[in-house]
């Protein structure tokens, strides 16, 4: 890959010199090494999935969100916020998502009752027409009932003018899965998409959860979002709940489900069953 780039730089004549000076500096080399490592991460078993619970108003577990993890011997643990955008650029987001979907669906089958699992979808996945088939395959391979799978979308995909996104979301919905808007309130400010798409869940971004004094502007926004969600028949989820005071406020504001370090950090897959067993009747200290 690097050789090919150098070759094309040379073939452009004098601009080749510029290429060497500008591109082959230390950060560019590090980035190329990171990309090369990411291309091989799946086959080298460096990708893992952790699961963070969401609880209802009584503190009872309702679902888990699948959060991808990458640990590389050279680079250490790299945050998904950092490597997902790179995976999108280098064409690795499809195989990584397939891996996460398969893991999530298979694990959810082992949980008791109606517990659901949520998987994050990058907007890039909507560029090919394959997304719906991928989801269908993961459901079929695991035997998970479709209503137990939630797909978290970002506002970006809902804003896209292209009708392909609308058609794909309708096709996903027709499989019987539930659709969530992640990080609600941080993207574009148009609310028109809330009636254009077949959505089920709004996840209020954690940046609104920080200051929950009832008179603070964050609190006013959270109350407005949760009544909007309720009027539209959507489940409203608050993420990033770290303190009991935040949780009390968010419950008063009318949110339906809650996720955050107050309840649990993202857990390795093999710890989810034990966590569920311990918190079957609600999270510790969660009684209203
Ligand atoms: P997100 O989907 O909004 O996930 C929530 C993030 O907040 C996670 O970070 C989670 O670990 C973190 N979090 C949970 N509770 C708390 C809390 O109480 N306080 C604070 N400060 N943070 C909390 P994480 O795991 O680093 O993931 C970051 C982002 O990376 C995710 O944001 C999501 O957009 C993306 N991501 C993660 N896994 C995947 C994946 O499989 N596919 C795609 N496309 N994106 C993913
Ligand atoms: Mg999410
Ligand atoms: Mg989120
Ligand atoms: Mg977020």
Image (cartoon, rainbow, N blue to C red):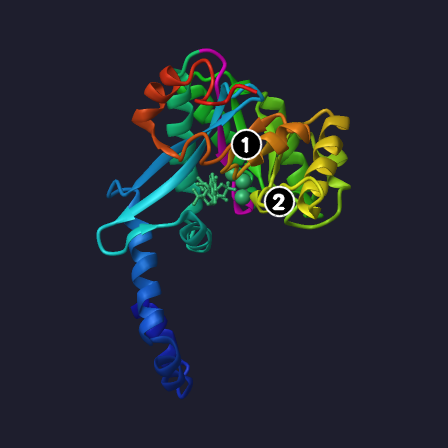
Q: Position of residue 27 (x, y in %)?
A: 35, 70
Q: Position of residue 177 (x, y in %)?
A: 57, 24
- Which mark is first along the chain, 2 or 1? 1
**Quadrant in which residue 206 is drawn:** top right
Q: Quadrant of the N terminus?
A: bottom left
User: Can residue 1 be seen?
Assistant: no
Q: Which residues are magenta?
A: 113-125
Relative depth, front residue between 109 and 61: 61
Residue 248 relative to residue 43: left or right: right
The residue carrying mark 1 is: 151
Residue 200 relative to residue 134: left or right: right
Q: Determine the residue located farthest toward the left in the rendered image.
A: 73
Is residue 124 in the magenta section? Answer: yes
The residue carrying mark 2 is: 208
> How much space separates mark 1 and mark 2, taking CA atoms?
22 Å
Q: Determine the residue located farthest toward the top in the rendered image.
A: 113
User: Can residue 284 be seen?
Assistant: yes
Q: Quadrant of the C terminus?
A: top right
- Tell me: residue 282, above or below residue 78: above
Badges 1 and 2: C-beta atoms under 8 Å apart?
no
Secondary-structure class at tag 2: helix
- Tell me: residue 32, above or below residue 47: below
């Amino acid at each position: 890959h690097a050789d090919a780039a150098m070759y094309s730089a040379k073939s452009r004549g004098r601009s080749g010199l510029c290429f060497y000076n500008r591109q082959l500096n230390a950060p560019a080399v590090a980035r190329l090494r990171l990309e090369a490592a990411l291309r091989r991460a799946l086959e080298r078993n460096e990708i893992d999935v952790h699961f963070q619970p969401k609880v209802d108003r009584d503190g009872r577990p309702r679902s888990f969100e699948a959060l991808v993890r990458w640990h590389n011997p050279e680079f250490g643990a790299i945050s998904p916020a950092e490597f997902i955008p790179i995976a999108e650029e280098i064409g690795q987001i499809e195989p990584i998502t397939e891996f996460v979907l398969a893991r999530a669906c298979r694990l959810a089958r082992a949980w008791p009752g109606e517990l659901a699992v949520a998987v994050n979808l990058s907007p890039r996945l909507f560029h090919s027409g394959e997304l719906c088939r991928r989801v269908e395959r993961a459901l079929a391979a695991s035997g998970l009932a479709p209503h137990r799978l939630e797909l978290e979308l970002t506002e970006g995909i809902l804003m896209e003018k292209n009708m392909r996104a609308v058609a794909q979301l309708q096709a996903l919905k027709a499989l019987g899965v539930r659709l969530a808007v992640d990080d609600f309130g941080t993207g574009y400010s148009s609310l028109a998409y809330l009636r254009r798409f077949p959505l089920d869940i709004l996840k209020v971004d954690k940046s609104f959860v920080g200051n929950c004094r009832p008179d603070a502007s964050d609190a006013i926004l959270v109350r407005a979002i949760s009544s909007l969600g309720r009027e539209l028949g959507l489940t409203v989820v608050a993420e990033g709940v770290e303190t009991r005071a935040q949780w009390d406020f968010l419950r008063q504001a009318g949110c339906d489900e809650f996720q955050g370090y107050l309840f649990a950090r993202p857990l390795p897959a093999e710890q989810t069953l034990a966590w569920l067993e311990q918190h079957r009747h609600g999270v510790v200290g969660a009684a209203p």
